[in-house]
Amino acid sequence: MSIELETPDKLEYQFHPVTSGSLNFKIKAPNDAHVALTAGPEEADPMYEVFIGGWGNTKSVIRRDRTKPDKAEAETPDILSGDEFRGFWLRWNGGLIEVGKEGEAAPFLSWQDPEPAPVGHYGVCTGWGASGAWVLDGGHEVQTADKLEYQFRPVPVGALEVFVRTPSNAHIALTKGPQETEPMYEIILGGWENSASVIRYNREKPDKVREDTPGLLGSDDFRRFEVRWEHGLVSVRAGAGGGAPLIQWRDPAHIGVTHFGVRTAWGASGRWRLRTFDPRSNLPQAGAPGFSVPSAPPAGSTPTWVDARAGEVPPEAVPGGFDGEQLYVGRAQHEGALIPGKVVPSHGVCYVAWGGAEHGKEEYQVLCGCDVTWVPTAGGEIPSNALPSGETEDGEPLFTGRAQHEGTVTVGKVQASHNVCYIPYGGQELGYPDYEVLVPK
């Protein structure tokens, strides 16, 4: 999905939740395009700020917690324009903040934070005499050589719009990380000299499904496809969409997909235009009995627990922490208890703490559709307006809490009678007497 918005000449951020560790955007402004990375939907420490084209469109910097000195800076004369859109990308992972120009792989700004801060939202604004127009998370365009090597990008939702121009062998990988993983799905369009298409699991034969598709791809024009994966149903539709899938296969187990990769080979190079979109906007029909997608109410409404599994993160999921990737607020059943915990998309589970150990649950619920704040407290104290998030096997209420541990911010359960917040980490259940409690706004 892409978001288009305008920011006035006012240093006031407009915030949106993040769904991955990167942001692609275009900005038309004469100077001072600012992007903030924060835990919640407001300016609050800790936070990262990226200033592009500051100081009269001469310099760009990375700043932490709104304080000087800047953590990184670069001379960038005329990097912005008030007459045309300029494209940029921003990535964050484990405290490494990188900023680059669209079409360039190397960043022009980067900084490694020795104490990584959680990122749950991003904000954009302009100021210092400049207003701006933004296109956020728009379509990607990449080129692939005649080389069996995927180019990977994060994907926040379960659908991908693909325009590809190549004579044959357009390959798409769906993985649990920014590299070839096991398990993984692999889609080969126009293989075997543009005569057949397949879905493959873990790069293994026999193919899970194969269809004859003569003349599917073309070297003179872009061909459009929709690739979807939700609840283990992997499907590809050709052309304008609608109708029966070109190829389709249901994985009885299914994996939590966090990245996609594209490549060409076997004598073919290709040009791709790629855009993620919300699959709820056009649900598959033919051949998909019982298919459904987790749904959530708009942000700011009543807190809702949405069923999910295998790494799925529904729209409007509430971010809760960070451990090399964004963690989300979840809960799962275990030994007769309903326990708040952390959803780790790349692991495909929600981890909960119980009985001194960390337990990964493939089926879980994710908190969605509300803005929250995290209230510091200690010793079993629970704010009066905290959200009850579960209960023990004996019926004692449990609340969602979080604590800092070994450079992470990890979501767990607060059990008032035990005077601590328990977090699941490294296979253990760890108790912290000082913690934060989730409170809906």
Image: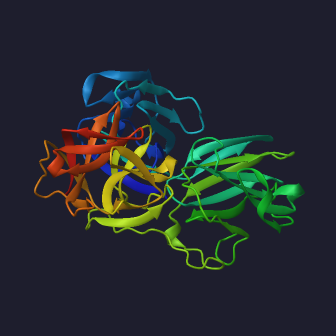
Asked whether, in this view, residue 36 is left or right of residue 375, the answer is right
Foreground of the two, 220 or 18: 18
Q: Is residue 104 above or below residue 326?
A: above
Q: Position of residue 274 (x, y in %)?
A: 61, 53
Q: Position of residue 343 (x, y in %)?
A: 41, 51
- Dividing the picture into quadrants, the one containing residue 216 is bottom right
Q: Is residue 145 visible?
A: no
> Looking at the image, which residue is at 50% across and 64% down?
278
> Looking at the image, which residue is at 54% across and 73% down?
282
Q: Position of residue 354 (x, y in %)?
A: 33, 50
Asked whether, in this view, residue 240 is left or right of residue 406, the answer is right
Q: Is residue 295 above or below residue 91?
A: below
Q: Position of residue 61 (x, y in %)?
A: 38, 27
Foreground of the two, 93 or 129: 93
Asked whether, in this view, residue 306 is left or right of residue 220, the answer is left
> Looking at the image, which residue is at 63% across and 41% down?
179
Asked whether, in this view, residue 67 is left or right of residue 358, the answer is left
Q: Is residue 93 visible?
A: yes
